[in-house]
Each structure stands twice: as C-alpha cells, then as structure tokens.
Amino acid sequence: MSHRAIVVDRPLPDARPEAILRRVETAAAALEGGIDVDVLFSSVNYKDAIALTGGPGILRSLPLTPGIDVVGRVRTSADGWSAGDTVITNGGGLGERFDGGLAERSAVPAAHTIALPDGMTARTAAAIGTAGFTAALAVQAIATAGVSPDDGEILVTGAGGGVGSFAIALLAARGYRVAAVTGRESLADALVDLGAERVLERSEIDVADGKPMQSSRWAGAVDSVGSTTLVNVLAQTSYGGVVAACGLAQGPDLPGTVLPFILRGVTLAGINSVEAPLARRREAWAELATLPVDVIDSIAPRTEPLERATTIAREVLAGRVAGRVVIDTRA
C-alpha cells in the first residue's frame, strides 16, 4: 500500500536537492529489521530544516525522507512490541541514514525506540521530540556531575529554540536558577514564564575577542550554539562547573584555550542524543513526562500538516520560529 512521504531527491546538475511530497510504495531507504509503524506525528528540527531545504551534511544518501523524530503506532508485532503500541523514536539514524518521520509510515530502529510514557499523548511526545530529549540529557549531565541549585546560576544559550526552551523548563523544575540568552528581545517574557530568572541579550555572551579567562558567572550551562559563544561560556564558568554542549548553531569550531579546564576544573560534557542507549532514553523521557502539558504546549503551540514541512523549515533557518513546530503526518 502506498503512503505519503516527503522525499528529498537527487538534484539536477548545478542545483540543490529538492524536497517533494509524493506517494511512495515503500520507504526509499527502509531500515532493515526496523519496527514498521504508522507515523502519527513528527516535527521540524534544525537538522530537518537543513535537509528539507537542500543543505549539505545531514542526509547520507539520496533519495531519502527527512525527519529525526517519529511518534507512531506499531503495525505488526516485532521486537517485543505488539501491534497498536504507541512508540517514540528520536535519532538513531532516522532522517539521516534511513527514511525518517516526515511520512505516513516509517521503519524505526528497535535500539532507539521506547514506549510512549503513561499519560502522555502522541502529540505531546512529538512536541517534546529530539529537542526536549536533548535538553533532558543535558540537564541530567549537569546534575549527575554534582552541580546543585545552591552552586549558582545555570546559563542556557539559544534559549529561544526548542532545546533551550526545554532546558529552561527542566532546570527550573529541578530548582536551579536560570539565566537565558537570546538574540530575540520579544521572547523575554515567554522565557521568564518557562522559568528563567533573567534574560540576557546575546551580545553579552557572543564576544569574538573575549579573554580566555573571564569573571566567574555560571555554575553550569546548556549550550546549543557552539563556536565563540561556547568559548565565552567556558571562560565564565565557575570552578568545578559543567557545560553541556549539544549544538552548533553558530558553528562547529571551538576557538578557545584549555585554561578553563586546567585552572578552574571546568567540564565540557558532550551530549549525543542520536545514539543514546535505551536506559538513558527511558530516564530522560520519564523526566520529560513530569513537565506540565501547558508548559510543553507553550514551547510547541503550532501543529502543521505534512505538506507545510518545507515551508516551516525555511522559517526555522530564518530564525522566525520560537520553540517547536509539530507535524501531523495524517493532515
């Protein structure tokens, strides 16, 4: 039976790859041995936005269906799952090596798939998605390393994005005092509503010629920006602090020094949500399930049909989307 999917095709000479919504008989690059699911919801993450607009570095082969998030219903019993079970898959190669969630049907890797938490709806799970999952891993890395709410403020960069928004909510729920950084002044009130005690303008942190060691300001940080912003965050982190790095919106480079590590004992913790093992996935999602639904909905208020995914992708890359956008694959 055919189903609708957004497929990024091979480009014509001297052209970018093109994302097209069309009917397909089978997944273009179905995961061998994957769990066959009817996709209920997906989302447009930063990675998806790049893939949908023909950008390089995300899709490992073409043609391929983007979408690193899948919330779906199992079609046929397999790998301990029963037909009708609702499952969540984030990463695991979806939308990069294998056909992803921007389709009505997908094959998801069992090693990266968990059950929908009790009491959570499929739409809510998609609203959280990889962004919320990554934020939970980052917050847990800071807490597990021993940074407590009594140690000082936690900085969240890229606070207007999905990862940053969920990081603020999760940190506040644990009792941390949060300082949020954004380049969009219009988001300040919303970030405070999520739990930030104060909001900083991006220029306060993004200083190209910042000193390798700066005044101690943060007990820890969640950074989704990278590059010079991350270097300055490290230089401002207090003794024994932990910085969880989970993104590269500004760039993949790290033009700094080792001084924060060897003079203040700062830890740079890398967060990889793609290959996180099942135990960590279940732990992260258990924490995410404690967030109030109205908080999640405030981060992801929009639900759009599958046919609008590419339009949303352009908005994401242009910085016109705050938080998250859910894609209803059946609409």
Image: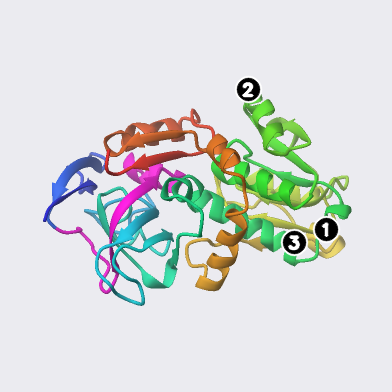
Magenta range: 26-55
- Asked if the stretch drawn in magenta spans residue 54, the answer is yes
Compared with residue 97, is residue 220 higher up or lower down, i.e. above or below?
above
Which dot marks residue 221?
Answer: none
Residue at 45% over, 59% down: 116
Q: Quadrant of the C terminus?
A: top left
User: SS class of the residue under badge 1?
Assistant: loop
Compared with residue 73, is residue 55 higher up or lower down, i.e. above or below?
above
In-front residue for pair 180/59: 180
Compared with residue 134, is residue 196 higher up or lower down, i.e. above or below?
above
Q: Are marks 1 and 3 in contact (CB under 8 Å)?
A: yes
In-front residue for pair 268/255: 268
Q: Quadrant of the N terminus?
A: bottom left
Q: Amino acid at mark 3?
A: Ala
Q: Can you identify the residue that label 3 sits on?
A: 143
Q: Can you identify the residue that label 1 sits on?
A: 148
Q: Is residue 225 left or right of residue 235?
A: left
Q: Are marks 1 and 2 in contact (CB under 8 Å)?
A: no
Q: Can you identify the residue that label 2 sits on?
A: 186
Q: Amino acid at mark 2?
A: Ser
